[in-house]
Structure formats: structure tokens, C-alpha cells
Image (cartoon, rainbow, N blue to C red):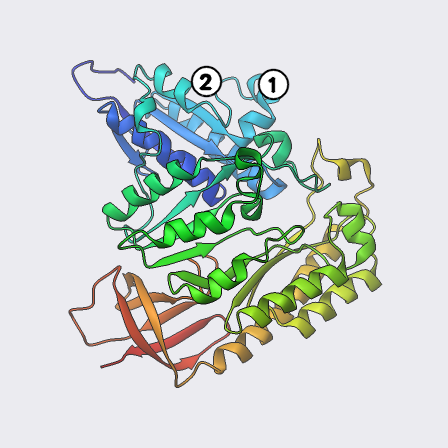
Amino acid sequence: MQNNPSKKKKINLISLGCSKNLVDSESLMGQFQLNDFDVSFEGRSEGSDVVVINTCGFINDAKQESIDTILEHIEAKQRGEIGKIYVMGCLSERYARELKSEIPDVDQYFGVNDIKKIVEEMGGNYRYDLIGERKVTTPKHYAYLKISEGCDRRCTFCAIPGIRGKHKSKPLEELIAEARRLVAHGVKEIMLIAQDLTYYGIDLYKKNTFAQLLQSLSEINGLQWIRLHYAYPAGFPTEILKIISDNPKICKYIDMPIQHVNNRILSLMQRGHSREGTLKLLHEIRDAIPDVTLRTTLIVGFPGETEEEFQELLQFVKDFKFDRLGVFTYSHEEGTTAYRLEDNVPEDVKQQRLEAVMAAQQEISMDLNQTKVGKTYKTIIDRLENGYYIGRMESDSPEVDNEVIIESPHSDIEIGEFYNVNIVKTDYFDLYGVISQ
């Protein structure tokens, strides 16, 4: 593919993996725009001078998706449809040597902290004075705010500390400035993300500063919802519970991955919390915030997990009744402590256990949803799809949680605005409502 020096450099960026990766992609695109490059997000790659692929290297399925995406674009390059291919992110950080050897047709590999190098490789100037400027790719009314990088925990199944390094909090003033910029561009809901939200500030300020961050964010005019993702149970700062309960801007929503409840498995995972401590904390949260939505994530099929230990987890799910729940099968990852253990739970058994947990959660979700019928909830409208408006309540985060489907004759409904919606019926994971007059 021939480049015309008189034209803007055309770049297509593809972002894979989690929302933390997405923020990195948005930051890179912000730098591209400041250099007057023609940048698109997950558009058509044909005709691009450069395709940048921000990869995920966390678990097997994500790694395979990243490799498949790279190979697909190498074929397009060989057909002359695109110019160069740059690969960045967790996969290339974790497997740089192997990738360079096995997939040499990629023009450049970059790690997770190489945004400056990528900009300069493109011939651009990296702007330190505009760190935090992003090209937001989500709908304009919500955005993610990454408050820290890396993780100091040593969960035996997790490769993230080896990829992203030790926990590093962003300074409070930088986060507030970034949030203000987002709100000035129309953002009304901010999702706080990190490997471990509740460790915020310990490295910078020698004390947990998460409560101060929440209070400061809530004082931003125009910001209406603040949502918490990925709160670690061990060392959870319970002082934030009153802030969440009392502050109308902070969603009564906590995403707390507990991973398991059997004490032997938790010890093998090096989670730092026990079944008893986890249950005590979960009940403390519900007591302090009676209308809280609790979301969790579980792992089934960890090395040596017996049927009895799995049944303990399954019964816990049925008894505690999390509002929202996701589950993964254990992925045997090189470089983790658990990799020394024998991955001895067969894949079909892992899958059966996953399906059993999700079947239980499906019934729990249906029962919880039915309690909402006939009630009215503040709902933000995310999009119009196939003639229906799709919204979310305070209890739901984008893409991972329930949605409210609204059939409305009102032509004046606006995307990104809040409305009172009366719930008229439900199914397992969605609700149906009408705009209240």
C-alpha cells in the first residue's frame, strides 16, 4: 500500500479485552488526534496506513481472540489492503519474545506502557501537558475512569501483576481534572475502574484515600452517577459505605469479585479472605446500604476443586442471592503461582460447573426482577435499537448487567437523558417498561 505524504496518516485502532484496556486505547487516540492524524475506532481497516491492535493477554479465550485478530490483519496486509500493523497491550507485554518469533509479519510490538513510543513511531509528538485527554469511544453520556494501574495482590491464578506491574495510584488532582473534562464533554455517568479500587492512594498518600476520591468526584457539577467496579474484599475500606449510602450521586452498586467461598480453595488462590470474613463483609454492606446492588465474579474448576467444594460454592450462590453475577472457568496461565499446580479438573467438568452456577443465578435474577414490576425507577437511555429505547437503572452497569427495554410512542426521548420508567414485565436478565408521565 502506497502512502501519500500530502494526506493525513490514517489509523484504525482495535481495542480488545477489558474496560481498563479501553481507557488506554482512548488515551492513545487522544494523542493521535492532537497530532492531527485521521484516527478511527474499530472501523474498516481497509485503506489504513496503520492498524493498531490493543490486545488482551489475561486468559486463554482472550489471548486467542487477540491472536486471531492479529492474523486476520496480517492477511489483509498481505493483500495490500492496509499498511503497517502495530500490536500493543497485555499480550505483547506478556509474550513479546514469542510473538516476535512466531508472528514476525507484525511491524512493531509495544507493551502496556508504550503509548509515547507508539506516538513517536507514527511520527507524532507526545504531549505530556495533555495526559488524561481521551477520545471517548463509549456513548457520550458515560465513560470509564481508571484510577490506578497494576496490582499488589498476589492471587495465584492472576497474571496481571506480572503484566501491569505493582499498584500505582493516579494522583487525586489528575483524576478530578480528567473527570471534569469528561463531564464538560457531556459525560453524566463515570465508572471507576482499576484492578483493585479499594487500594487507592496507599502508595501515594500512605493511607487509603478512596473515600476522599469519591467525595471529591461527587462535588463535580453535572456528574450524576458514579459507579464502583472491582472492589477487593480483603482490606475493604468500610468507611466508604456511609458515603455510598448518603451520597445520591454514588450508585448503590458495588462490584466485588469474591472468586470462591471454600476456605481451602481461597487459601490456594491466596486471596487473603475467608468464607467467614467474606460473608461478614457482604452482610455488613447490605446492612449499611439496604438497597445496594452487589455484583460478583467467581472461578470454577480451580486446580484440585472437588465436587464437594464446588457444591459449597453453588449453595452459597443460591443462599446469598447476588444481584448480579459472572463466572469464569479456571484458565491455567504461565507465570502464575497456580501454574505449578496440576490443572486436573477436566474442561467439560469446568463447563458443567459454570452452567450450573449460571442456571442458579438465572432463577435468582428472575425472582429479583419480578419484585420490580409495578415500580418506577430512574433510568438513563443508552441507545435506540430496533425501534426500542434501551436504558439502565442505577443497579446496572453497561454491557454486563440488565437492561430496561422501553417501547414508547414519545418521539422526544433523548439518548443520554434520565427518565422515570415504570416496569411492566421482566424476563431473566432484562426488564420492560414505559416512560412515566
- Closer to the camera, 179 or 399? 179
Residue closest to the eye, 355 or 335: 335
Q: Amino acid at mark 1?
A: Arg
Please state which amino acid type lies under the numbered disc 2: Gln
N-term-proximal mark, 2 vs 1: 1
Where residue 360 sits, quadrant-wise, is bottom right
Reading the image, the residue beneath label 1 is 97
Is residue 395 in view from this perspective? no
**The C terminus is located in which quarter?**
bottom left
Q: Identify the residue under disc 2.
A: 108
Please name the residue shown 27% across and 71% down the image.
Answer: 419
Where's residue 337, x and y in %? 76, 36
Between residue 112 and residue 209, name the one nearer to us.
Answer: 209
Q: Is residue 33 left or right of residue 430?
A: left
State the SS at label 1.
helix
Residue 189's x, y, as percent?
35, 55
- Residue at 59% x, 76% y is 363
Question: Residue 134's x, y, as percent?
Answer: 32, 36
Please tell me which residue lies in front, 265 or 215.
215
Crowding around mark 1 (Cα neighbors within 10 Å: few <14, some 14 to 19, many 20+) is few
Residue farthest front in this picture: 206
- Residue 282 lies, with reference to residue 76, above or below; the image says below
Point out residue 178 in the picture as x, y percentages from the top left corner. 34, 40
Q: Residue at x 32, y 59 (%)?
A: 224
Give residue 60's quadrant in the image.
Answer: top right
Locate the N terminus and report the quarter of the image it occupies.
top left
